[in-house]
Amino acid sequence: FFWIGTENAGLNYFDSHTKKSRNYPFASAQQSLSYHNIHSLLKDDRQHLWVGTFSAGLNVYDPSTARVKTYQHNPLDTNSNSSNNIYALYKDKEGTIWIGTTDGLNVYDPVRDLFHRIKVPGSMHNIFYNIYEDDNNTIWFITYDSGLIGLHKKTGQWVQYTADGKPHSLSSNKIISIHDDGAGKLWLGTDGGGLNCFDKQSKRFEVYDEREGVSGIVY
C-alpha cells in the first residue's frame, strides 16, 4: 500500500493488492487532518506519517493509535515551524527530519518535540521546494528564487549556485524538481529555464530548453 497526498482532496490510502483507495479519515469519528491541500509526505522510522499542508501546518499521523498531532507556525514561538506552508519533508541518512516551507528551512528535534530554524546564507526566507541528500553526504535544497543550495554535512559548509548569466551557470533560480542520476550529476527542472544538468565534479551546468525541444517548465 502507499499514501497519496492531493491538492484539494486530502489524504488517500491506496491498496495495490485490492486496487482500492480510501480517503482519510476512514471513519466519521476519526480525527481529521488540519487541511485537505497536501504538498508533502514522509514516513519516519516509527512508521508515523508526516503530512505537510498548504496553509495549515504539519500533521503527524500515528497509525497505531489513529491519532493526529498538528504542528503550526506561531509568530511568538521561534521553536515552531517558520511557516504553515509545508512544501518539503525529508529524512536524511542520519535520521534528521528536514522541513522546507515557503518561508525558510527547519529541522525537527525529537527529544524536545520542537523545531529549529536553520540559518541558510542568502536564503533565510525563501521557498524550499525539495530536499535531497547524495552519497557524499551533501544535502541539496532546491529553492524558488535562490537557486540550488548545498550543505556539506561533514564540514558544515554551505554552497549556493544561482542564475548569474555566466557560461555554464544555472539557467533559472526557480527550481521545482531534482533527480540524481547516480553518475555524479543532478538534473534540475526549473520554472522558465528548462532542464539543467549539474556536474558535481566540475561545478558546471548544461542547459536543455526549447532549442533542444524541452519545455521551459520542467517538473
Image: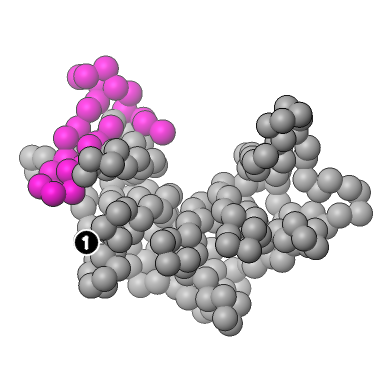
Q: Which residues are magenta?
A: 195-219
Q: Is residue 77 visible?
A: no
Q: Quadrant of residue 198?
A: top left
Q: Position of residue 46 (x, y in %)?
A: 63, 63
The one nearer the camera, 174 or 30, is 30
The amino acid marked with disc number 1 is: Val
As for residue 205 lying within the magenta part, the answer is: yes
Q: Position of residue 174 (x, y in %)?
A: 33, 44
User: In the displayed image of the protein, which residue is found farthest to the right?
Assistant: 29
User: In the displayed image of the protein, which residue is found farthest to the left?
Assistant: 167
> Where does the N terminus fall, quadrant-wise?
top right
Residue in the picture at 60% in, 73% down: 74
Q: How is the image coloured?
A: one colour
User: In the displayed image of the protein, which residue is found farthest to the top?
Assistant: 213
Q: Quadrant of residue 177?
A: top left
Q: Position of residue 206 (x, y in %)?
A: 16, 35
Residue in the picture at 79% in, 54% down: 32
Residue in the picture at 58% in, 62% down: 45
The one nearer the camera, 190 or 44, is 44
